[in-house]
Amino acid sequence: MLCYEKKKNALTVRLSGELDHSVVTAIRGELDSLIAQTGAKKLILDLKGLEFMDSSGIGLIIGRYKVMSRRGGSVAVSGTDARIDQLFRMAGIYQLVERLA
Amino acid sequence: MSVINEMRLDFEALPENEAFARLVISGFMLPLDPTMEEMADVKTAVSEAVTNAIVHGYGGGTGFVRLSASYDAAGEMQIRVVDHGRGIDDVARARQPFFTTSPGDDRSGMGFTVMESFMDGLDVESAPGRGTTVCMTKRIRLRDDAVPQRA
């Protein structure tokens, strides 16, 4: 179960623990049903609680960017540490997704 | 320089073993007293290689993945991830950023790029039907008092 909060049109979801291939399918399913249920126009992923992330996280973000784009919405990330930043820059994520402080 | 410590581990190609492989490699490199950053580099690269073996090598089928590693007194680590799965047709193409064989599946295609960026050396040997061997090198900067010695 993901921790989330909806304010106006923005859905904020906090991810925690380790984000790798073994958990990404479940997280993707939960995120997509939250997006559908809440009808949010903006998805904010708070990554502060993540202890580990590999390129599975990049795939998750790009996939959610596609989902939100199809709905006319957008994605933002917050709480990224230096390592996650490095991974996201490598993949050009910040051309698609806003980075919040 | 000669190897002063070595390990080998065979585990089933199951997603839950990705975290296990990361834990093992972190524990193995501890005597080198790595920084958090060096440890995270190695953990991430191993995670990518092991995930590739499970997802692409065996594609959900059964088989074993071997993780082996060694280091020398200068702090140079050699890490190998081997599977006996379906192999890669075109290694050069597979190593391109964003290349993925399963685009609908939210795979980023960044696995080899991440390994290459976080490690000091990456070599991939593969042939269709003959499995894949990923060899990675990482130089851990040794602090003065942390030089591991074999008696």
Image (cartoon, coloured by chain):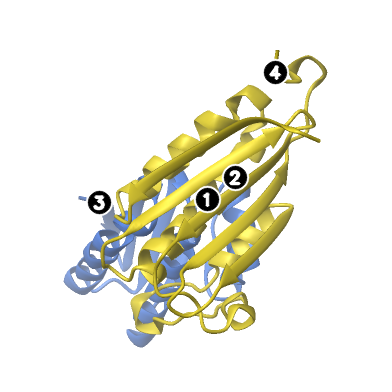
The chain letter under disc 3 is A
Q: Which residue is mark 4?
A: B150
Instruction: Please tell me how crowded label 2 is: few (under 14), some (14-19), or many (20+) other residues with Cα within 10 Å.
Output: many
Label 2: which secondary element? helix
Colour yellow belongs to chain = B
Precedes in sequence: disc 1 or disc 4: 1
Callout in the foreground (4, 3): 4
Which residue does the image show at 70% across and 45% down from the upper left? B138
Question: Mark 2 belongs to which subunit?
Answer: B
The residue type indicated by label 2 comes to: Val
- Report the residue at 59% width, 45% height from top: B42
Q: Residues within 10 Å of mark 4 (few under 14, many from 20)?
A: few
- Check contact, mark 1 vs mark 2: CB within 8 A: yes
Q: Image quadrant of residue B146?
A: top right
Q: Residue at x 80, y 31 (%)?
A: B74
Mark 3 lies on a secondary structure that is loop
Mark 3 to mark 1 CA distance (whole Å): 27 Å
Q: Which residue is mark 1?
A: B46
Locate residue A96 relative to residue B23 in the image: left or right.
right
Chain letter belonging to callout 4: B
- Is A67 on the left-hand or right-hand side of B91? left
Tell which of B148 and A48 is nearer to you.
B148
Q: Is residue A50 visible?
A: no
Query: Are the residues tagged 4 and 3 within 8 Å (C-beta)?
Result: no
Where does residue B51 sit, x and y in percent of width and height? 42, 59
Q: Decide: marks 3, 2 in contact (CB < 8 A)?
A: no
Q: Residue B87: x percent and y percent?
A: 46, 74
